[in-house]
Image: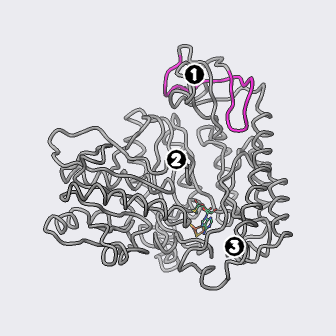
Amino acid sequence: MEKIIDESKQGTSLVIEANEKNARKLYIESYGCQMNFSDSEIVASILAKEGFNTTQILEEADLVLVNTCSIREKAEQTIRKRLEQFNAVKRHRPAMKVGVLGCMAERLKHKFLEEEHIVDLVVGPDAYKDLPNLLEEIDNGREAINVILSKEETYADISPIRLNSNGITAFVSITRGCDNMCTFCVVPFTRGRERSRDPQSIINEINDLYERGFKEITLLGQNVDSYLWYGGGLKKDFDKASDIQKATSVNFAQLLDLVASRFPKMRIRFSTSNPQDMTLDVIHTMAQYHNICKSIHLPVQSGSNRILQAMNRLHTREEYFELIDNIRRIIPECGISQDMIAGFPTETEQDHQDTLSLMQYVKYDFGFMFAYSERPGTLAARKIEDDIPEEVKKRRLAEIIDLQQQHSMERTQAQIGKIVEVLVEGNSKKSDQHWMGRNTQNTVVVFPKENYRKGDFVNVKITSCTSTTLIGEAIGYGQMQ
Ligand code: SAH
Ligand code: F3S
């Protein structure tokens, strides 16, 4: 899953190997973006030290935690239903405690704890280190809450326990929060201001993964290209940093260079890039290293300048095209993917046509496409009426999805006959006689296993495809083996 919301993983409960000394059982379920799944690994790590093993059986849990997502109304509704189910179980097991983590914590804390009494514990994304204290509170029969957003917290010192891992690919978070204030988005409110993590702690975490046999890492953040380390603190306070801090600061291109050169046998991916913050330096660094994957997730949200402005996306359609042209010039084989929102308030048919024509220009490899969902508290919710009828949003979204499917098909078909390097992640979903992995562009590749093993880099000759999957045959080990 590259960033974002992988529907097949929503609500997955996560388990890790049991520590025999641990007596209590934690059931933890995650929703939303990869950052949430990654945060659940941090939470499991903190709670392992408090005597908790993870379980996938809800009925035997002492503590049930839901890592929640607020990005669209539908996500919140799904989680609410789930909380009702947990409460039904709790009626038979009154000692079981239920807690809400993540993005819904801040927004709905009073409702959950005081009005509806459906949870015992509410913890926001920057307060997970407070969990041991909060658990003591609930053990003593009190409700517990901490939704304070931090200027500093990056969990740099927590070594996340890998939950449900394939042992080959892992996510490493490098920034938290977001300062962009896109007018439709709740993230700046639920996750706070942007801060970057100490590069040394990033290197240490990757080194640990490397020594345990992992072969690919994805550097994670709401806006990775905005990464800036100058000794700690908020991105917005960089201006106030000392001259030495400024001179020794590390930006995203430099971090990529650092990681790629230090771990030549590991594949490096990153997600997500915001067009306004992606520099030519980053593109050149990608081109320079074979082990940095040639794939960029570059959400654009709309193809209309008027709508981009209303969304507070700080670039125009023309500037976006310039960035795409630069990527294609410097890295011709680069995979490019998008996020798109259909039916933002005031969007006209012409604006929608602009979105389709932007897609025609770029021809994305794949995308995540959504109907606009008004989020309470955002600037759009406060200032602009959600005036596009639901059926219009749905129709425009369907047109966007249809066009994306055509482009995905064209992009995969263009790979037929080519030889691509694949990192084997595990069995193909459909057959245990086939391996599944990804090429550098992040497209899934399936091929007969022969004598290759999980974790191998294999050159595969592509013979056929669907719009999402390349099918081929192994012809030998890849360059990174
Ligand atoms: N910076 C993050 C954005 C996280 S939200 C990133 O790029 O990964 C992921 C996507 O959800 C956004 O790119 C946007 O397309 C979509 N989204 C966010 N808020 C939305 C809303 N209110 N309605 C519909 N889609 C939304
Ligand atoms: Fe949201 Fe825009 Fe940041 S989509 S996460 S405010 S880049």
Q: Would you say the beta carbon of the disc 2 residue lies within 8 angstroms of ligand 1?
A: no
| Mark 1 surroundings within 10 Å by alpha-carbon count, few (fewer than 14), some (14 through 19), many (20 or more) | some
Residue for badge 3: 314
Could you tell me which secondary element the residue under label 2 belongs to?
A: strand
- Residue at 77 percent of width and 39 percent of height: 409
Prevailing secondary structure class for the magenta stretch in the rendered image: strand
Q: Do the residues labelled 1 and 2 touch (CB within 8 Å)?
A: no
Amino acid beneath label 3: Leu
Q: In which quarter of the image is residue 387?
A: bottom right
Element assignment for label 1: strand
Determine the secondary structure under disc 3.
Answer: loop
The amino acid on which the numbered mark 2 sits, given as a three-letter code, is: Thr
Q: How many labels does the image show?
A: 3
User: Residue 317: x and y, percent?
Assistant: 80, 66
Which residue has dot 2 on it? 218
The disc at residue 434 is 1
Near mark 3 (Cα within 10 A), the count class, few <14, some 14-19 or many ≥20, is some
Give the quarter of the figure containing the N terminus: top right
Judged from this view, the residue extending furthest toward the bottom is 383
| Quadrant placement of the C terminus | top right
Q: What stretch is highlighted in magenta?
A: 452-472
| Residue occupying the far top of the picture | 451
Provide residue 141's location: percent of width, then percent of height: 15, 69
Left or right: 154 in relation to 322 = left
**N-terminal of the two: label 3 or label 1?**
3
